[in-house]
Amino acid sequence: MSLLKDFKEFALKGNVVDMAVGVIIGGAFGKIVSSVVGDLIMPLFAAMGGVNTTDLKLTLKEAVPAVLDEAGAEITPAIEAVTWNYGAFIQNVIDFLIIAICLFAIIKGIAAATNKLKKEEEAAPAPAAEPEPTAEEKLLTEIRDLLKNK
């Protein structure tokens, strides 16, 4: 039972929950960025130069078609081409750069907002100290204390 209790404490800690939310939001954010790159930015490059980067590849070994006998039975199976898909790599690098720039902007914005709040708190006047009791209040307090002691 102690193991279950320990796991429950671990799983419900604020840091673990925050991290889980961050991972889920990050996954969704990654899909958005991939869509921005794949659907908005890369078509602009393709329109300018007529190149689709995801299709860029270097063929290392050509494909070999299947060899069939006269009856149509396969003697040697077909072998697919071996390619080095550097266009997909370029696409992923662009995705990464856009994500990094977005996160940098978000963190910069949060830091600026935090600094602004700190400056506002520092500039706010300190709460005024309570005024000293008047002579009448001091006298009444002494009388009250004397009556309590009797």
Image (cartoon, grey):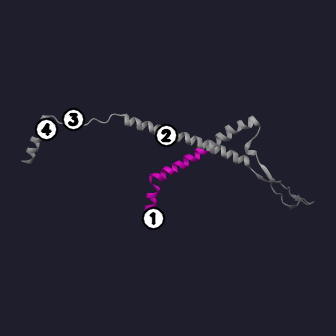
Give the main secondary structure of the magenta stretch.
helix
Q: CA distance from mark 1 to mark 3?
A: 56 Å
- In the drawing, does residue 51 fall left or right of residue 3? right
Q: Secondary structure at mark 2?
A: helix
Q: Could you say whether the residue bearing mark 1 is in a helix, strand or loop? A: helix
Residue found at the very far right of the displayed protein: 70
Query: Which residue position is annotated with label 2?
Result: 110
Q: Amino acid at mark 2?
A: Ile
Say which of marks 2 and 1 sits in front. Answer: 2
Which label's residue is closer to the chain start, 1 or 4? 1
The amino acid on which the numbered mark 4 sits, given as a three-letter code, is: Lys
What number is the disc on residue 138?
A: 4
- Among numbered discs 2 and 1, the one appearing first in the sequence: 1
Residue 3, disc: 1
Residue 136: give x, y in percent of width and height: 12, 34
Circle 1/circle 3 CB separation < 8 Å: no
Quarter containing the N terminus? bottom left
Residue at numbered disc 3:
131
Q: Which segment is the magenta one? A: 4-30
Proximity of marks 3 and 2: CB atoms separated by less than 8 Å = no
- The reply to whether the magenta stretch includes residue 12 is yes
Q: Which marked residue is nearer to the observer: mark 1 or mark 3?
A: 3
Q: CA distance from mark 2 to mark 1?
A: 39 Å
Density class for disc 3 (Cα within 10 Å; few <14, some 14-19, many ≥20) is few
* Residue 32 showing in the rendered view: no
